Amino acid sequence: MTLIKINAITVPDGSGDELARRFAQRAGAVDGQDGFEGFELLRPTDDRQQWLVITRWRDEDAFQGWVNSPAFAHGHAGASRPAAHGGPVSVSSELWSYEVAGGSPAA
């Protein structure tokens, strides 16, 4: 069963384009990870400041394999630096975990 991980990232006004740019620079970085099924970065279309990073995984073990991988560590290496020097552009984040309980088939 597919496991959905959603990272809800709070991004202050004016920082969203930088967040999107950084994700675009790392496009494909997770694609070869065992158990990885898909990725989406969702930009809010209303006044919210929460961007959603949605990933799909075969199971929790596959997700944990990614989190504990050198590639994950490399992609998150600037966390202690200021945003202007490659550090985070977000002010907070929250990780949510879901499994698919219903829906319609993909077209």
Image (cartoon, grey):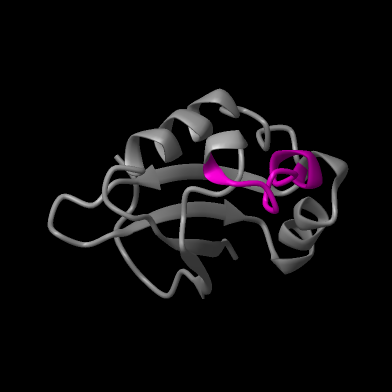
At x 41%, y 44%, the residue is: 41
Q: Does 68 sit above or below residue 69?
A: below
In the rendered structure, does residue 43 fall within the stretch colored magenta?
no
Q: Position of residue 31 (x, y in %)?
A: 66, 33
Q: Does 10 sit above or below residue 17?
A: below
**Closer to the camera, 86 or 95?**
86
At x 70%, y 40%, the residue is: 75
Numbered disc total:
0
In the rendered structure, does residue 79 fall within the stretch colored magenta?
yes
67 displayed left or right of 51: right
Q: Position of residue 42 (x, y in %)?
A: 33, 47
Asked where in the image residue 18 lies, by quadrant, the reply is top left
15 displayed left or right of 37: left
Residue farthest to the left?
A: 46
Residue farthest to the top?
A: 25
25 displayed left or right of 69: left
Q: Position of residue 69 (x, y in %)?
A: 85, 48
Highlighted range, magenta: 72-83
**Quarter of the N terminus within the rendering:** bottom right
Q: Position of residue 8 (x, y in %)?
A: 43, 64
At x 75%, y 40%, the residue is: 33
**Quarter of the C terminus within the rendering:** top left
